């Protein structure tokens, strides 16, 4: 699988295009802003978008999805627990001075363990609440697209509505740390990393007694 990264919005959120290199079928993940930039990269790469996904419902991860839905006529999927949050995308984005964000049309809900197919590539959904109730990761082979769950050297915020440090720790402990050390971590902001690079401090964090982030 080839993964194209497109930093979007003043928050530098990493939109990603997951591409099956054999068929050029693609899924667009976390289309949060700058729809024109995303469309340009789709055209440049000559890929064929099949659907849109969101790791969670914050506006900087869903705000451009409806524009791409309308352009390509493809469905948008996310976890149901963040649906109400995504519905407020336009209002919340405006508070950050980001005009043009719109609430996506949700065509279906993702569930834990659900199989995803992109061309000849197959992956699955991991429900990983903590940053938000409906946060999910997408695992394709050794590539983990994890949204704002985990970053290089840090974990996601839990002080936003619906966040929970205990849920975040549980998600990391049960769903992420069991993965192989060479798993490539594709975060919602900032650089990529590997689980092996983060594992030592991450184990200390999930086993600690911190109550909030």
Image (cartoon, rainbow, N blue to C red):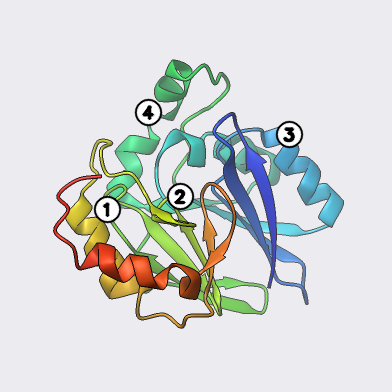
Q: Which residue is mark 1?
A: 130
Residue 108 appears in view: no
- Residue located 43% across and 17% down the image: 95
On residue 107, which mark appears?
Answer: 2
From the viewer's perspective, tell me whether residue 94 is left or right of residue 84: right
Query: Which of the two discs, 4 and 3, labels the residue nearer the N terminus?
Result: 3
Report the quarter where the N terminus lies. bottom right
Q: Residue 128: name its quadrant.
A: bottom left
Q: Is residue 112 above or below residue 8?
A: below
Q: Quick one: SS at disc 1? A: loop
Q: Residue 152: where, in percent of width, then height?
A: 49, 57
From the viewer's perspective, tell me whether residue 30 is left or right of residue 87: right
Q: Nearer the viewer, residue 179 or 139?
A: 179
Residue 118 appears in view: yes
Q: Residues within 10 Å of mark 1 (few under 14, many from 20)?
A: many
Q: Which residue is mark 4?
A: 88
Query: Which of the two discs, 1 and 2, labels the residue nearer the N terminus?
Result: 2
From the viewer's perspective, tell me whether residue 64 is left or right of residue 167: right
Report the quarter where the C terminus lies. top left
């Amino acid at each position: 699988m080839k993964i194209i990264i497109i930093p979007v919005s003043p928050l530098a959120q990493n939109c990603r295009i997951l591409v099956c290199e054999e068929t050029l079928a693609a899924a667009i993940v976390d289309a949060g802003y700058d729809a024109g930039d995303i469309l340009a990269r789709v055209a440049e790469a000559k890929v064929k978008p099949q659907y849109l996904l969101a790791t969670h419902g914050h506006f900087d991860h869903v705000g451009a999805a409806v524009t791409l839905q309308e352009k390509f006529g493809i469905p948008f999927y996310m976890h149901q627990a963040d649906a109400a949050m995504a519905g407020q995308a336009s209002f919340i984005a405006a508070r950050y001075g980001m005009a043009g964000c719109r609430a996506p049309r949700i065509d279906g809900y993702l569930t834990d363990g659900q199989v995803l197919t992109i061309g000849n590539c197959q992956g699955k959904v991991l429900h990983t609440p903590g940053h938000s109730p409906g946060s999910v990761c997408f695992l394709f082979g050794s590539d983990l697209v994890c949204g704002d769950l985990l970053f290089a050297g840090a974990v996601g915020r839990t002080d936003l509505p619906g966040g929970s440090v205990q849920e975040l720790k549980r998600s990391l402990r049960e769903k992420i740390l069991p993965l192989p050390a060479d798993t490539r971590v594709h975060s919602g902001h900032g650089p990529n990393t590997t689980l092996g690079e983060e594992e030592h401090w991450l184990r200390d964090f999930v086993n600690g007694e911190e109550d909030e982030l």
